[in-house]
Each structure stands twice: as structure tokens, then as C-alpha cells.
Image: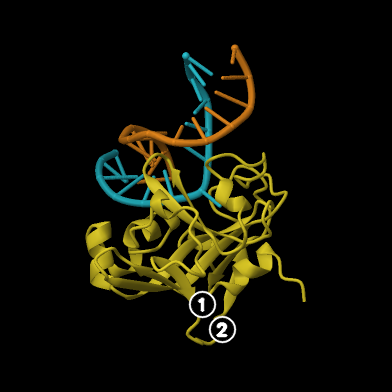
Chain colours: A yellow, B cyan, C orange
Amino acid sequence: VPVGTVDLAQALIGKLLVRRLPDGALLAGRIVETEAYEVGDPSSHAFRGQTVRNATMFARHMHAYVYLIYGMYHCLNISTELPGEGAAILIRAVEPLAGIERMIELRGARDARSIARGPGRLCAAFAIDRDLDGIDLDVDDRLWLADDGHPAADIGTSIRIGLSKAVERPHRFYVRGNPHVSGPRALSP
DNA sequence: TTGGCGATTGGCT
DNA sequence: GCCAATCGCCAAT
């Protein structure tokens, strides 16, 4: 069966995001919200072709595309297609599982529910910035994905958040009822 | 060379 | 709910 960027965005729900900090500390969270940016999507950074910033979107699948947004937050994406094809999945939120105290420290003390709820908060909690842009998640020892066999969740679908172009595409996926999911209430019933 | 704007967030009304 | 913060990118000059 063919698996594209959009299917993969759904398949990533429930997987673990794991981070090893420079001092050896381990952080982990379960992915509860993603968005797909497939080839030909006008709202994708890759839509107008490859540039220095978005080069990792054109890398082979499973590479970390990290970019700076609004001059102060980072967003973590995972490249999904063949070399030369610009596409990625934005990791919008995770449910913290391990290293929670450290995440709170990295984020500045907040309530547990908002530690990694939203792409900018997630990157702050996991100490992810452009230094990790371009790394291969299949081999790197600083950031990777894992599957702990956790049963598939009840996954909802909606339009994506914060876009001005191609807003109608139903390419956001989230765990129904999970308090660590970001965005307006109306988009996560 | 320039300036409008963004896959966001937190603080304030 | 509204809006400022803050800066790199990139289309237009």
C-alpha cells in the first residue's frame, strides 16, 4: 500500500519523540498532534522551491526540518519523501512522559498541560533549535522516534492551524480528548 | 537593498 | 478576545 505524507502524519500519532540532551538527560513524549505539508501544497515552505532555509524538506524521509518562526520560536518537522521532493510533517504537540521536570525548567515553569502543547512550546521543552536541522532521525543520538506499542488512539482530523493559504485541506491529526493537544477547542472536538 | 510577514505565544483588556 | 514581541526569509524594488 502506498504511504504518502498525509498518511504518515496520521501514522505518527502515538509514536514517541525522544531527545538526549548534551548532559545525557533523556526526554520523551508521545506525539498527540501533527500536520502534513505535502508536495504541491501552497502553504508549504517548499512550495516555491528549495532554498537554504527549507533544504531539509527536500532531504530523504526522516530528517529533522527545524525552522525559526516569528523571530522567537522553533518548529520541528520530519521530512517524508524522496530526495528532491519537498514535504514534511509538523509535530505540533506531545504528551510529556519522561524528563518532565527538565522540560518545565527549559520552558519556564508552567502547568503540566502546557509544557509541549503547540509547536513552539514543544521545541522549547525539548531544547530543539536550528542546530538540529538536517539530522537523520534514524541514526542520530540527539533526537529520534520510537514505537512503544501503545494501542492506536482515537484520531481526529481537521483543517490546519495558523495558515492563510490552502486553509481548507484536512491535514491536521490529533488524539481526541487528549489535554496536550493545541489549537482552538472547535478544531479538536 | 528593503520591508512586509510568518506552520506562535503570553500577557493584558 | 486582542495584540505586541522579534528576526530571518524572500519577493519586489
Question: In the current view of this chain or complex, which residue is farthest to the front?
Answer: A139
In screen coordinates, is A66 left or right of A8?
left
- Above or below for A71 versus A132: above
Q: Residue at coordinates 73% horizontally, 49% vertically from top-left?
A: A40
- Above or below for A13 versus A45: below
Residue placed under numbered mark 1 in the picture:
A14
Label 2, residues with CA under 10 Å away: few <14, some 14-19, many ≥20: few
**Placement of the N terminus of chain A among the 4 image quadrants:** bottom right
- Residue A108 visible in the displayed image: yes
Question: In the current view of this chain or complex, which residue is farthest to the right?
Answer: A1
Q: Quadrant of residue A165?
A: top right
Residue placed under numbered mark 2 in the picture:
A152
Residue type at mark 1: give it: Gly
- Above or below for A29 versus A47: below
**Placement of the C terminus of chain A among the 4 image quadrants:** bottom right
The reply to whether dot 1 and dot 2 touch (C-beta < 8 Å) is yes
- Measured in 3D between alpha carbons, the distance from the residue under mark 1 to the one under mark 2, in whole angstroms, is 7 Å
| Residue A74, percent from left and from top | 41, 50
Q: Residue at coordinates 67% horizontally, 64% vertically from top-left?
A: A6
Residue type at mark 2: give it: Ala
Q: Nearer the viewer, residue A15 or A145?
A: A145
| Residue A88, percent from left and from top | 60, 57
| Residue A64, percent from left and from top | 50, 58
Q: Residue at coordinates 60% horizontally, 55% vertically from top-left?
A: A59
- Chain of the residue under the numbered disc 2 shown in the image: A
- Above or below for B8 versus A178: above
| Residue A62, percent from left and from top | 56, 64
- Residue A180 visible in the displayed image: no
Q: Residue at coordinates 59% horizontally, 71% vertically from top-left?
A: A156
Q: SS for tag 2?
A: loop
